[in-house]
Amino acid sequence: MTGAEWGFLLRGLLWTVALSAAGFLGGGAAGLAIALARGSGRPALAQAARGYIAVFQGTPLLMQLFVAYYGLALVGLKLSAWTSVAIGLTLHASAYLGEIWRGAVEAVPSGQSEAARALSLGYVSRMRHVVWPQALRISLPATVGFLVQLIKGTSLAAIVGFTELSRAGTIISNQNFKPLLVFGVVGCLYFLLCWPLSLYGTRLQRRFATAVR
């Protein structure tokens, strides 16, 4: 592979990282709202959150990205490939992160909330100072694991013509006719991104399991 091809792959890698960060941060903010809605105690709000999660967990990410780009264009909202993919990944991540964090909140012993109520703490203060700090710790392994899946999911951005790492590899292999070499390198780059995160998630899971014993 030439220097120009390496440079093109590395630019694709940077776009993969940027897409992953946009989807994870945006999905995290929306996922927090989803988790709060699920646990709000208001039936209409909780049902709406359950429906949202069911839609985005029950449909392929590929279809969601396709709709975000081509579907919005049909109703007059023409967005760039970057924006469309970022929106699609954000919606996808919010459904999964919202459910992960809701489960973590429910895993916090009920006695913690009861003690906070006994101290006359309101819902917001109870969640902010008592429940969420413990839930965050519980949810970290699953959250990191989802981030790894999200990074790999950015390869589907090619459906709308966005050039991230996987599509960059496709373009180069079509030019130099060395697909095995090119996608071997692409696979190594994905591995270098995901493997440290996977190790970190496993380490967090073991640490949490040890602390619970």
Image (tube, rainbow, N blue to C red):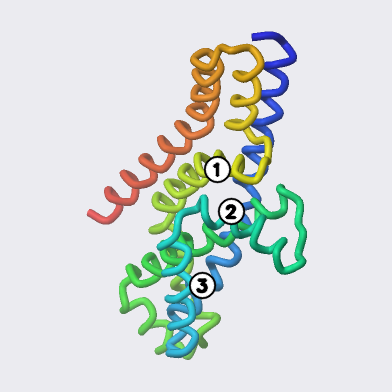
Image spot of residue 25 (x, y percent): 62, 55
The quadrant the N terminus occupies is top right
Where 73 falls versus 38 (above or below)?
Answer: above
Cβ–Cβ under 8 Å for marks 1 and 2: yes
Q: Residue at x 72, y 11 (%)?
A: 3
Q: Which residue is mark 2?
A: 65
Q: Secondary structure at mark 3?
A: helix
First-in-chain label (1 vs 2):
2
Q: Secondary structure at mark 2?
A: helix
In front of the other: 87 or 172: 172
Local packing at callout 1 (Cα closer than 10 Å; few below 14, some 14-19, many 20+) is some
Quote the CA–CA distance across marks 3 and 2.
Answer: 20 Å
Left/right of residue 177 with respect to residue 138 in the rendered view: right
Please tell me in which quadrant of the rendered image residue 53 appears: bottom left
In front of the other: 31 or 163: 163
Image spot of residue 183 (x, y percent): 52, 21
First-in-chain label (3 vs 2):
3
The quadrant the C terminus occupies is bottom left
In front of the other: 15 or 163: 163
- Mark nearest the camera among 1 and 3 is 1
Residue type indicated by callout 3:
Ile
Q: Which residue is mark 3?
A: 34
Local packing at callout 2 (Cα closer than 10 Å; few below 14, some 14-19, many 20+) is many
Image spot of residue 72 (x, y percent): 68, 63
Residue type indicated by callout 1:
Leu
Q: Residue furthest front?
A: 74
Residue type indicated by callout 2:
Leu
Q: Residue at x 45, y 49 (%)?
A: 146
Image spot of residue 149 (x, y percent): 46, 44
Q: Which residue is mark 1?
A: 156
Q: Secondary structure at mark 1?
A: helix
First-in-chain label (1 vs 3):
3
